[in-house]
């Protein structure tokens, strides 16, 4: 008992540090505005560690706790306030947890298994039982209280990946929504080397900022990264030849090729849902217009035709329309082009600047950059109802990207003069700021689910 | 009276010969040739006031724009006309027009704004007799600010087109 408790205490302190080491993002600062009273209380009890070393490769419980808390839908119970540290359902003191209003408990165990590790966890519903059946004075757990039980055998290097997978399972079980904790984020980080000299890095990291991998480094700007629908490729704009060109690059191998290098602008690439085409902006015919390029054949289809700036296209999830920014009405607003029938509708009418549209995965809403009183916010608009809601209180917002489960938006903004990423839940209630440790961070792009 | 003005122009011309050429960014390789050409122009056209005034006008090579706007400031027309005359008289020279925007708003829309601004400047040049083949346009949008602050004065300095003769 004593030994096990000591291990749990060590795990608790390790948990305070494990998610700040090696992360491109610094310590996550959670600012919850408007009080998210509907957040589900959950206690992720530090997993038992049966190994000889003082700590397992990663503190799974701390990663799961952090994932769930930062989704905005859960309130993770602090380890130092836990009334007990059960490691299996049979050890749970239900009255103690019910007494503090805890609805859900996660308990688990990690043990070495040859060169690998065996990980077991259960998600337990604290309130579901009626009085448990008594047999010879011993409480018997009703099986309906264990919502999920899983066992895994993994290598040391896969501990974080498993922790995020466990977060996904728990999240989906309790909210009905698919978890996005195993997804990735692409972004550009910028180092200032001298007065006019910068270095740009295109990187991909876990959604919690860990394990950044560099895809490209350049002394010239990199902008507009866009994930292919299966998450195997990134399109982006590079100024490496002193002008904007569109490249596509395989994430796994780093193999890259320029796909658009016409005179004038080559920009804002986004992939069609069937991954065969890229929508983009080209000005080769005299003016910035939207085109669709078949990636294999490089054949171009022109989508817009007018004297105004048309740019920042994005495909609807069903592939039937493309939304884009146009200033044909005088100032930038968002329009929708229907591919079958060549019809165009204006979508935004609130405010004098709406740009850079991104659909939610259900195709019902668009996220955009919205100017109000000279301040640039992220806003969401229900397309059918036409209602716009401003989500952010930060003021120089740009480049919003939506989670593949539609629950959250990450965007770029300024914090005390430095470029940082921030996140806001789709209902605007939960806001997170993600200060970076190295240089400035911008141009976030949320990966799809990796099936 | 006319002589007075010419003397004044001469003094100014002498003072600015060192920065002659399309850009006021200081000496580069090839400026010696420029200087020789302008010096020649000064002595042979020394009594021709417009050459000297053109040199002075051509010192202005960065052109600024209002927020959200891509139309050239009327006050810049004279300088651009001088650049145009220089280019029209020197077919071997190319004008590179680099368009920029301030950091606010979205990056790709700012790329298009920068390009529209550069194209507006190009149009003034072509209307003043410069051939399109002498003009190169590129936009950097908000990616290469001249001023790093996040305030109105910095933003005003970043909404610009830079003209460079090579």
Image (spheres, helix red, strand yellow):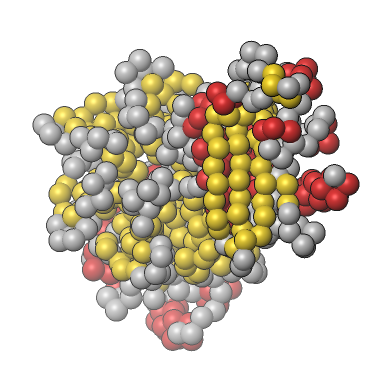
Q: Quadrant of the N terminus of chain A?
A: top right
Picture residue at 40% right of the left edge, 49% below the top? A450
Residue lying furthest front: A136
Picture residue at 44% right of the left edge, 20% below the top? A388
Name the image quarter holding residue A249.
bottom left
Name the image quarter holding residue A240.
bottom left
Picture residue at 49% right of the left edge, 61% below the top? A202
Name the image quarter holding residue A316.
top left
Q: Position of residue A221 (x, y in %)?
A: 48, 62
Q: Position of residue A41 (x, y in %)?
A: 67, 25
In the rendered structure, the answer to whether residue A182 lies left or right of residue A127 reads left
In the rendered structure, the answer to whether residue A53 lies left or right of residue A25 reads right
Residue B21 visible in the snapshot: yes
- Above or below, comparing residue A158 to residue B38 in the picture: above
Residue toward you, B83 or A100 = A100
Picture residue at 69% right of the left edge, 21% below the top? A135
């Amino acid at each position: 008992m004593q030994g096990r408790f000591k291990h749990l205490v060590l795990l608790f302190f390790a948990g305070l540090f494990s998610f700040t080491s090696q992360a491109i993002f610094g310590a996550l600062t959670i600012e919850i505005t408007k009080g998210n009273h509907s957040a589900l209380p959950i206690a992720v009890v530090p997993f038992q560690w049966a190994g000889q070393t003082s700590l397992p490769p990663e503190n799974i419980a701390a990663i799961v706790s952090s994932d769930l808390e930062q989704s905005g839908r859960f309130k993770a119970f602090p380890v130092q306030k836990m009334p007990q540290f059960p490691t299996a359902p049979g050890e749970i003191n239900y009255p103690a947890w019910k007494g503090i209003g805890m609805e859900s408990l996660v308990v688990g165990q990690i043990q070495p298994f040859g060169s690998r590790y065996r990980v077991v966890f259960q998600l337990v519903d604290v309130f579901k039982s009626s009085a448990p059946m008594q047999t010879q004075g011993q409480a018997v757990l009703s099986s309906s209280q264990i919502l999920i039980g899983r066992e895994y055998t993994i290598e040391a290097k896969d501990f974080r990946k498993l922790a995020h997978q466990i977060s996904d399972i728990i999240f989906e079980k309790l909210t009905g929504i698919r978890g996005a904790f195993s997804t990735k984020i692409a972004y550009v980080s910028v180092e200032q080397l001298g007065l006019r000299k910068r270095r740009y890095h295109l990187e991909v990291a876990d959604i919690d900022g860990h394990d950044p991998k560099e895809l490209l480094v350049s002394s010239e700007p990199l902008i507009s990264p866009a994930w292919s629908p299966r998450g195997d490729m990134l399109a982006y704009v590079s100024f490496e030849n002193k002008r904007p060109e569109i490249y596509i690059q395989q994430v796994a191998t780093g193999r890259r090729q320029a796909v658009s290098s016409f005179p004038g602008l080559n920009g804002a690439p986004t992939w069609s849902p069937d991954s065969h085409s890229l929508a983009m902006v080209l000005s080769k015919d005299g003016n910035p217009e939207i085109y669709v390029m078949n990636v294999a054949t490089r054949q171009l289809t022109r989508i817009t035709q007018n004297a105004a700036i048309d740019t920042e296209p994005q495909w609807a999830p069903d592939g039937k329309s493309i939304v884009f920014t146009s200033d044909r009405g005088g100032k930038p607003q968002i329009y929708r082009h229907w591919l079958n029938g060549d019809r165009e509708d204006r979508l935004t009418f609130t405010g004098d600047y709406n740009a850079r549209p991104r659909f939610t995965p259900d195709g019902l809403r668009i996220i955009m950059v919205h100017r109000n009183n000279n301040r640039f916010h992220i806003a969401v608009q229900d397309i059918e109802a036409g209602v716009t809601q401003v989500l952010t209180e930060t003021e120089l917002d740009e480049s919003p990207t939506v989670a593949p489960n539609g629950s959250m938006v990450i965007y770029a903004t300024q914090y005390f003069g430095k470029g940082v990423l921030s996140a806001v839940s789709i209902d605007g209630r939960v806001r997170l700021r993600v200060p970076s440790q190295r240089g400035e961070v911008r141009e976030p792009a949320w990966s799809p689910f990796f099936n | 009276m006319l002589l007075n003005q010419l003397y004044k122009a001469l003094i100014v011309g002498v003072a600015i010969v060192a920065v002659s050429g399309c850009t006021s960014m200081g000496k580069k390789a090839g400026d010696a040739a420029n200087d020789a050409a302008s010096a020649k122009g000064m002595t042979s056209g020394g009594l021709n006031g417009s050459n000297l005034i053109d040199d002075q006008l051509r010192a202005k090579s960065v052109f600024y724009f209002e927020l959200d706007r891509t139309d050239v400031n009327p006050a810049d027309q004279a300088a651009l006309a001088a650049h145009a005359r220089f280019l029209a008289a020197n077919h071997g020279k190319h004008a590179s027009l680099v368009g920029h925007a301030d950091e606010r708003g979205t990056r790709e829309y700012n790329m298009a704004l920068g390009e529209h601004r550069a194209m507006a400047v190009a149009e003034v040049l072509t209307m003043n007799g410069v051939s399109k083949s002498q003009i190169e346009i590129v936009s950097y949008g908000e990616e290469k600010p001249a001023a790093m602050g996040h305030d109105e004065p910095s933003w005003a300095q970043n909404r610009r087109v830079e003209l460079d003769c090579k």
